[in-house]
Amino acid sequence: MAEGHRRLVAVSNRVGPLNDEGKAGGLAVGLSDALKRRGGLWFGWSGNTSSKGTFSEATTEVEGNVAMATIDMSEEELQGFYYGYANRSLWPLLHYRLDLAEFDRQSDRIYRSVNQRFAARLAPMLDDSDLVWMHDYHFFYMGSELRQCGFKGKIGFFLHIPFCSPEIFTALPSSHDIVRAMLAYDVIGFQTDTDRRNFANFCVRELNGQKLPGHRLQVGDRIIVADTFPIGIDAPGYARFAVSPEAGEHEEMVREIAGDRLQIIGVDRMDYSKGLVERFRGFERLLEEYPENRGTVQFLQVAPLSRSELGAYVELRRELEELAGHINGRFATLDWTPLQIMTRGFTRRALAGIYRAARACLVTPLRDGMNLVAKEYIAAQDSDDPGVLILSRFAGAKAELPDALIVNPYSTDDVARAIQRALTMPLDERRRRWETMRDAVFHGTAAHWCDSFLDRLERSGRDEDGPAGE
Ligand code: ADP
Ligand code: F6P
């Protein structure tokens, strides 16, 4: 812990890794970059199930200045909390997929009880001088549960994924309970102004709240801060990864296999929010409408499996494999396979090398809180021959990276046109766009995100903020 800082206690469902293991997920990447700098305690789920579940003892591992304390869940908790409420109700709802959202009383109950038990396990490890920082939609109730356990210090919350419009959020049977519980936090952080406004509008319209100056909200006699803190990556660190020997080997390998062909890359968890089906169709349209690309481009989609117990994800995998087979069947020649899909993980260094070898990167989610792949791709390029980022207008990253080629991911023609433009873009335009985006990625780093959030949390409850911690 740096001198003069209070201890940081971060809480998230997934904990770690701190090293370059290549696990997919923006939260783990952003938070580990931030925690390694500042040190502290990281608390959450062990990733295991055991019969005692959240009653189990916490296991603590220390790596450098970070202690990671984790507890198990029971099988029932895993099903009801993680697969059920978090990923069958909240995830689709907050990503505007009301058609995929399922609501049931049982998983709602288990979600609340897991939040309560995690809080009860964490409370004895805390001191009121700690800064507690909760992360993501798994723990909406945990701040209010920690208050019930008697914790009086500051508690912040950051939502890594979108906060949908109130019209959609009110479909959740517990929407009022959730937002009322969130008022226990002193500062609530969002990725974009749109998310922040959606939350504020919910408070105003549904809970008779009031917007106050300084991005504060008042509901009843409770005043909290709800502000925008876009997450970033450790950009200088990532740029160093990109020139490491491991990155070099992977870059070389991709270039060798590509030969004279231009490489297009996509890197996403296999999730319906990432717009992969629409992206594949956009690539197919490119080959239809711009036939000069047949035999001269190849598209590699890295898509590690995620939440594969859930029906919507099983269905997505089936659809993607079928579509990839269809596109390859339609266009492949004896010496050319247009599209390759790969579900394996890579270390961050290896991935950085793969990004470097790619002329264009497709980041086309239908909705995304931020999207760190977009920032990693930019950080991995250099001025000699920078690639082109094609970015969805529905990714949080669009606010900071308007110099990407911005597309509507639902429009097959728009995606095809953007790929064609990326493949034919002159070097000076590629450089110009990349330089502006590089500046943004190096400015809005994980460290900046962490420091600005924690600084706001430290200041909350003072001067204009009114009483906090009640
Ligand atoms: P999300 O949090 O929804 O998964 P992000 O784009 O914000 O989306 O973050 C994904 C993170 O996971 C990035 O840091 C990316 O590099 C990493 N990642 C994605 N696929 C892989 C993979 N196959 N191997 C290693 N890391 C991956
Ligand atoms: O960044 C969004 C996020 O949902 C994180 O909360 C999560 O850790 C990550 O994506 C991967 O999802 P999961 O933890 O369900 O594998």
Image (tube, grey):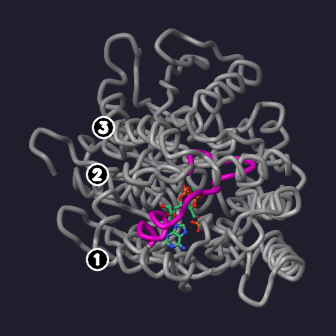
Q: Amino acid at mark 1?
A: Pro
Front position among marks 1 and 2: 1
Q: Which residue is mark 3?
A: 451
Say whether disc 1 or disc 2 marks the residue closer to the N-terminus: 2
Does 202 sit above or below residue 30? above
Residue 212 coordinates in the image, percent (x, y)? 54, 10
Given residues 64 and 372, the one toward you in this image is 372
Residue 103 shows in the view: no
Front position among marks 1 and 3: 1
Residue at horizontal 32%, vertical 51%? 34
Given residues 185 and 263, the one toward you in this image is 263
Query: Pointer 3: residues within 10 angstroms few (<14), some, or many (20+)?
Result: some
Magenta range = 351-371
Does 447 sit above or below residue 189? below
Residue 421 coordinates in the image, percent (x, y)? 68, 46
| Numbered disc 2: secondary structure | helix
Q: Which residue is mark 2?
A: 236
Q: Which residue is mark 1?
A: 245
| Numbered disc 3: secondary structure | helix
Residue at horizontal 65%, vertical 76%? 305
Q: Amino acid at mark 3?
A: Asp
440 with respect to 463 (left or right)? right
Does 213 sit above or below residue 130? above
Distance, label 1 to label 2, CA atoms, is 16 Å
| Numbered disc 1: secondary structure | helix
Distance, label 2 to label 3, CA atoms, is 17 Å
Q: Amino acid at mark 2?
A: Pro
Front position among marks 2 and 3: 2
Residue at horizontal 32%, vertical 57%? 239
